[in-house]
Each structure stands twice: as C-alpha cells, then as structure tokens.
Image (cartoon, grey):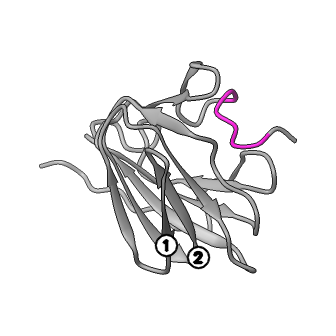
Amino acid sequence: MAEGTFIDIDKAPQMKRGGGIVTRPLIVQHNTPGAKFTTGMTRFPPGEGAPMHSHNCDEQVTVLEGTGIYEVDGVVTELKQHDTTYIPAGLPHRFHNTGDGPMAILWIYASPEVTRTFTATGETVAHLSAADMMVAD
C-alpha cells in the first residue's frame, strides 16, 4: 500500500519570487515522489501579480484570500475569495492582485513536471526554478 504525505504548512518552505511574491510548494516531486500532480500556494502583495504566461499542462487556481483579476485572451475577469479558474495547457494567462491587502491562491497542475513559458519573451523555464520569477527585484 502506498504511503501518504502530510505537509505542515508552518514548516513548508517559502520561495521568494520577486516583488514581495512568496510561494509555498506543497505537493511537488522532491517531497512526494510518484504524485501525478503539483500543488502549492502563492501570496501576492497589493499591486503585484504574475506576468502573462502559459504552462505545459492544465492548471486550476482557487483564490484563498483577497481580490484580483484573471486575464486570458484580453478578457479580464474580477476574482474574489473562493473563485476558481481552469486553464488548459498552452493558454496564456495571468493573475494580478487589485485589492488593498494580500491575494493568496492555491494552484494545482495536472502534471508532476511543470514548465512556465513567459509570453513576452517566449522563454520556457522549469516551474519553481531560479529562473521562474514573477517580478525582477
């Protein structure tokens, strides 16, 4: 029988992604070998967000806290707590905090190996690698 994994959120590592954006990887290959998906949470300070990008796999995002926007194909949708998005692989999109306080999201990728392609440059990087920054500090 397979062994389960427990992640204590208070002990989960934090990754600084630029502009005060912080990510906590949760279910990722290095801590959960064999998982067929990748999950984590990202917190955006007011006025910050992810640049337009796409992934090699489907993504689901749920807003845990705060408000913001989701943009795809030039269409901007306002987001509030618990709103959820589904983004097919290869679809350029972005999230941005438009509120006065932090915006936190839970993200789930439908693959254990995730890449991010930045729309502006066409550069593809490994998800959560040193090159996978949201904002240059």
Give how far across and how far down residue 108 sits, in percent: 37, 52
Give the class, few, some or many, for how many residues have Cα within 10 Å of label 1's Cα (few <14, many ≥20): many
Identify which residue is drawn at 69% across, 43% down: 134
Residue range of the region highlighted in magenta in the rendering: 130-135
Q: What amino acid is at disc 1? A: Leu
Q: What amino acid is at disc 2? A: Thr
Q: Is residue 52 above or below residue 117?
A: below
Which residue in the protein does label 2 denote?
A: 67
Give the class, few, some or many, for how many residues have Cα within 10 Å of label 2's Cα (few <14, many ≥20): many
Q: Does residue 3 appear left or right of residue 5 in this picture?
A: left
Front-lying residue, 14 or 82: 82
Name which quarter of the figure residue 60 lies in: bottom left
Counting labels gives 2
Q: Is residue 123 above or below residue 70?
A: above
Q: Is residue 5 above or below residue 112?
A: below
Identify which residue is drawn at 40% across, 74% down: 83
Which residue in the protein does label 1 denote?
A: 79
Label 1 vs 2, first from the N-terminus: 2
Q: Does 132 lie within the magenta span? A: yes
Q: Which mark is residue 1?
A: none
Q: Does 8 lie within the magenta span? A: no
User: Element under label 1?
Assistant: strand
Identify which residue is drawn at 82% across, 38% down: 136
Give how far across and how far down residue 47 sits, in percent: 76, 64
